[in-house]
Image (spheres, coloured by chain):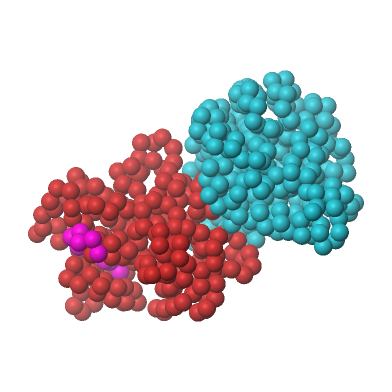
Amino acid sequence: MVNLAVNLGRLNLKNPVILASGTCGYGREIAPYLDLNRVGAITVKGLSYYPFPGNPPPRLREVYAGVLNSIGLENKGVRRFIQEDLSFLSSFDTCLLVNIWGHTEDEFTRVAQELDKLERIDALELNVSCPNTERGRAVFCSDLETLKSIVAKVRAVTQKPLIVKLGPEVKEWEKTLDVLENEGVDILSLTNSFPALFVDVEKREFFFKRKFAGLSGPAIKPLALKMVYEVVNYTSLPVIGMGGIISAYDALEFLLIGAKAVALGVANLLDPALALSVVEGIEKYLQGNKIGNLEDLIGKVR
Amino acid sequence: MREAIIEEKKSWGERFIQLKLKEEEIAHCAQPGQFVMVRAQKGFDPLLGRPLAVMKVEGDSFYLFWEVVGRGTKILASLNLGSKLEVLGPLGKGFSLSPSQALIVAGGRGITPLYFLASHFKKNEVPFTFFLGVKNKEELFMVDFLQDFSGAYFWSCEEPIEGGFCGTVISLFQSWLKDNYLPPGSRIYSCGPEGMLKSLYREEKIRDIPLEVSLETFMGCGFGVCMSCAVEKGNDEGYFHVCKDGPVFLARELKW
């Protein structure tokens, strides 16, 4: 038997495989196809305070080894999630992470307050890096002052472990990481999707109404790995690595460069049970290499 | 995802493909209007499954029929007899199945879920009339599918053709409406290009008869997590998701 448990500060996972926000719905949708008891954690789709309709279609376009999305954070709002889905999700033996966002700093805080009351929720993930928001390109993580203010306000209203999800639009990485450490963030997750473009040649127009969309999937994996590597180099905060993981070996790459856990995104769309094969593949790798504890493997390639 | 083995393959030119696939759960559970996410088993190109409507079920097997419209559907069309596919389904909400009388209006590949529906009606003795419109001679082979519904179908071709109605399926349907009465409890079912569905929805003579349409969109997952397959609600209150709320909708609930 190998021990797959990982420790991310105050957050302890039974294995390192997390379902990424926006690719497993509110849990209920993926549960018929994947035994949620077998994953380390599930990240509930990004919740705002009020329900939000998201972007106009088209919202998705497949490209080589990747997917462009312009969903625009459609969600049912934090209160409906609590009423409709939380008790269902609570029955699974897995950690519950909830991704949260807001149009304003105040909205971030209000969502956090609602969730802070709920014991079953293990951590909150602040989405400050979605490229598909109303403000378009001006994602929160690219403005240090705004980022600092949001994190401070949310930190003030919740004791739960706080994850901040970062993306390629962070401008000054070192300063950003300093701010997040100082404001009491517990964990970092990266990367969100890469701002990207698709042109419809027949129609001679941009495919997405918002022009830019977020690229994810295997195409971004090498880029994500480099980002995670550099962040791990700089900060002592535990990092959840993500970006194009579709196999156990992809996940092991992130773990070897120092990510404490990994999240699967597009993988859940193409096969809702793929996360399980990643868990089993990591287990098999450890057995094959006679490594008893996954923690002993983390950061071995630096 | 489960494995399905290709038991039969038929193709018409390079664009139209029909596969008979062995997979018990879909074969036993699929309802008319439901779909399946399909991936070629080897590798990750393309990444995502493609949503394809079920055309027919038979014992432990089911049939898919599709038109090659891009790389994904082309790669699926290149698979040979005996190869395995990965399938997820049956998915989505299908058609309502108990009208007193049904009118079925299909455009091109839109025939797929409607063929399944008509087979159900035939088996359950629900009276129906099937209207099929094809664009050109190359697509005329689809008329042969309707021979299973002897006497209960009409077809049109937009290209001049001997012995057939020349025009769109909407004009064919309109000419039929002139001479026929629809009793209470009737229902209209349709699947086809967006313009065709729109014309049908706006047809004055059938304004009071419920119209169910099956929609085709890009999908990421097929089971409701990614929210990619959004279509506008008719009441301007956000979006439906074709994979979970549909693919079959009452036309009046949608924005046209």
Q: Is residue A297 above or below residue A98?
A: below
Residue at the limit of the structure toward the front, as seen here: A1
Q: Position of residue B66 (x, y in %)?
A: 42, 68
Q: Is residue A118 above or below residue B20?
A: above
* Foreground of the two, A1 or A189: A1
Find residue B156 and report its horizontal and vertical position in percent: 24, 69
Name the residue rendered at 77%, 60% in the picture: A284
Residue B127 in the magenta stretch? The answer is yes
> Seen in the image, is B44 located left or right of residue B160?
right
Give the cyan chain's letter: A
Left or right: where A4 falls relative to A135: right
For the point 59% across and 51% down, the residue is A34
**Picture quarter containing residue B34?**
bottom left
**Residue B5 visible at all:** yes
Q: Which residues are magenta?
A: B123-134
Indicate yes or no whether the magenta region holds residue B247. no
Task: Report the chain shown in red.
Answer: B
Q: Position of residue A46 (x, y in %)?
A: 60, 37
